[in-house]
Image (spheres, helix red, strand yellow):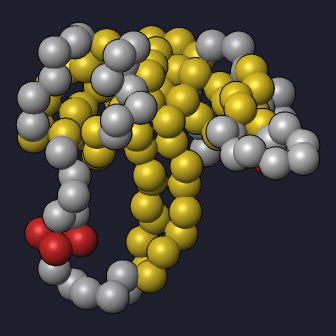
């Protein structure tokens, strides 16, 4: 069975969310086992997409390493699982909005989305 997986991280301090999409092959057919670490599932509506900026990857080395991030503001319409203390979040999408290849999977204004989130210490 093949599937698409979105890795999503929520920043507890400013409610920003960071995402990366990956194609994966499932090693089991058990949905409960596949989603064992999901702490929050929300249904929301994309309010708008912000300007792309460079984010430091936080990797120490001889050169600075950064990547393009495009924020999208998401209104939380319904909490399907877990607890959240805000009615909107900022979803950080990898890639530039001006690059058609990178932005083809970005969420668009007015779209309804379901996000499966995992809290991080960040």
Regarding residue 45, the answer to whether it shows in the image is no
Give the vertical position of 89 relative to 30 (above or below): above
At which x and y percent is residue 49?
A: 59, 17
At which x and y percent is residue 28?
A: 25, 87
Q: Is residue 16 left or right of residue 106?
A: left
Residue name at image x 40 percent, y 40 percent: 9
Regarding residue 44, the answer to whether it shows in the image is yes
Residue name at image x 21 percent, y 63 percent: 35
Q: Is residue 119 left or right of residue 58?
A: left
At which x and y percent is residue 89?
A: 36, 18
Quarter of the figure that contains the C terminus: top left
Q: Quadrant of residue 79?
A: top left
Pick whichever, 111 or 84, lies toward us: 84
At which x and y percent is residue 47?
A: 45, 12
Quarter of the figure that contains the N terminus: bottom left
Report the label total: 0
Give the vertical position of 86 relative to 5 (above or below): above
Residue name at image x 44 percent, y 22 percent: 16
Give the vertical position of 59 relative to 5 (above or below): above
Residue name at image x 24 percent, y 32 percent: 43
Pick whichever, 112 or 23, lies toward us: 23
């Amino acid at each position: 069975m093949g599937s698409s997986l979105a890795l999503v991280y929520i920043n507890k301090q400013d409610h920003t969310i960071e995402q990366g999409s990956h194609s994966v092959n499932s090693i089991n057919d058990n949905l409960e086992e596949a989603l064992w670490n999901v702490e929050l599932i929300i249904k929301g509506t994309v309010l708008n997409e912000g300007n792309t900026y460079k984010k430091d990857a936080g990797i120490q080395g001889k050169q600075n390493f950064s990547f393009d991030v495009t924020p999208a503001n998401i209104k939380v319409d319904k909490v399907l699982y877990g607890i959240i203390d805000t009615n909107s979040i900022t979803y950080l999408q990898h890639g530039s909005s001006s690059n058609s290849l990178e932005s083809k999977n970005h969420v668009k204004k007015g779209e309804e989305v379901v996000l499966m989130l995992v809290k991080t210490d960040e």
